[in-house]
Image: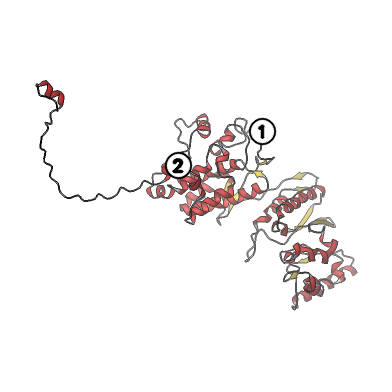
Amino acid sequence: MIGAGDIAVCGTSGDEATGKIVDSVLAADSIAKVHSEVFTLGDNAYPSGSGGVDNDFPRCFSPSWGRRRIMNVIHPAPGNHDYDSGSGAPYFTYFGNRAGPPGKGYYSYDVGDWHVISLNSELYFEAGGSAQARAQEDWLRRDLMDHHALCTLAYFHRPLFSSGTYGATQEVQGLWSILYDAGVDSMGRPFMAMEYVEGQAIDVYCNDRQLSLRDRLGLVLDVAKAVAYAHSKLVIHRDLKPANMLVTAEGAVRLLDFGIAKLVEGEAIENAKATQFSGRLLTPDYASPEQIRGEGIGTATDVYSLAVVTYELLTGTRPYRLKRASVAELEEAIAEVDPRLASDAVDDKLRRRQLRGDLDAILNKAMKKNPVDRYGTVDAFATDLQRYLAGKAISAREEASPAEIEIKQPPAPMPAPVPMPPTRVVRANPVSDTPPDARQSRGEPSR
């Protein structure tokens, strides 16, 4: 396998030099009867792979890597510059069936005992591309199941990890996850592999480092981004808790344990019948009212649980004050009792001032008993947190009732007393200070 990315730029010599090297290697391999294939990693022609008179593929790619010997064994993948015009139309026109199905750009092939997969990371960034990206992920799962090669190579343009200026493209996490979790061993046994994450639970991480309120909210926003991504794939986590949110030494958040996650079916999903806690898949301390009641769940379920985690990170305690600390009492509180305001749960005066008002309103809205009264999406919850951090008005304030706003507002300071001039009261008819009953007992008239 011979390959490169960011290949051809008109008027430069580097691409033509590497093209000659690849051509000579293929010629030598042919003589030695060695089978070789060529792959590209996107951005095949600069600056824009445009069509028409200035088509960069015949002008720039053809003189360098477009040699006949290379084109006979080439397997390209598209990059963002290949998509700069016409949704990649010039790219698909130039490479033809070597680029896979037109408009899709993902395909697979075999090289010896290896199974090779070329993927199109640009589908995540095209207009209406979410449906195309999901179709590619569905195809990738089927392709991995259909091919039981001991070794599989997959390549695409945009990286998930990068030390350069451009990179860390979280949108391609779905492709990585699928490639991680599928395989067949030498005995033909399928296996599932997961990324090993070394880190601390988010609450332990925050407390060990005594993070500020702002830094804690920053980590919550990172978690919210991961949860929102899962929701965009129609997956509800339904077990959000600090133990499932690890923070690495570098401060990167990893959301774990989708073991009881569920795919959305229509507008809501039903809890599975498998048993983890009292016949339900949940962690009571962070479960939503609808989970406790055994009702259908949706994205608002994760909004509630994430709000409970946020509450705990900001206050050091959980929303419900329990007398007996029993599971039954906790379930009753979650289902029926309004959580106390976050500002009422702390003793520190500074933290109480920070929580009172906007953060009280945000958490109160996110932990409403009725899912329809909460934020409609995790993104909406995160947006209000971001607006709070930016000092902007939050939507939870606008939607709160006057009573809720009054509760959340800090008490207004009493106005300073206005000095009054000295006065002297003169009573024309002094009245006895003796109680009427006492005067009557002495035969005095009451006045």
- Do the residues bearing badges 1 and 2 touch, measured as CB atoms within 8 Å? no
Q: Which residue is mark 2?
A: 404
Residue 322 visible here: yes
Name the mark on residue 274.
1
Q: Position of residue 381 (x, y in %)?
A: 55, 48
The quarter of the image holding the N terminus is bottom right
Q: Which type of secondary structure does the marked residue at label 1 adopt?
A: loop
Q: Nearer the viewer, residue 225 or 419?
A: 419
Q: Position of residue 297 (x, y in %)?
A: 62, 38
Colour pattern of the rendering: secondary structure
User: In the image, what residue type sits under mark 1?
Assistant: Ala
Q: CA distance from mark 1 to mark 2?
A: 39 Å
Q: Is residue 217 above or below residue 433?
A: below
329 relative position to 344: left or right: right
User: In the image, what residue type sits under mark 2?
Assistant: Glu
List the single residue furthest toward the front.
428
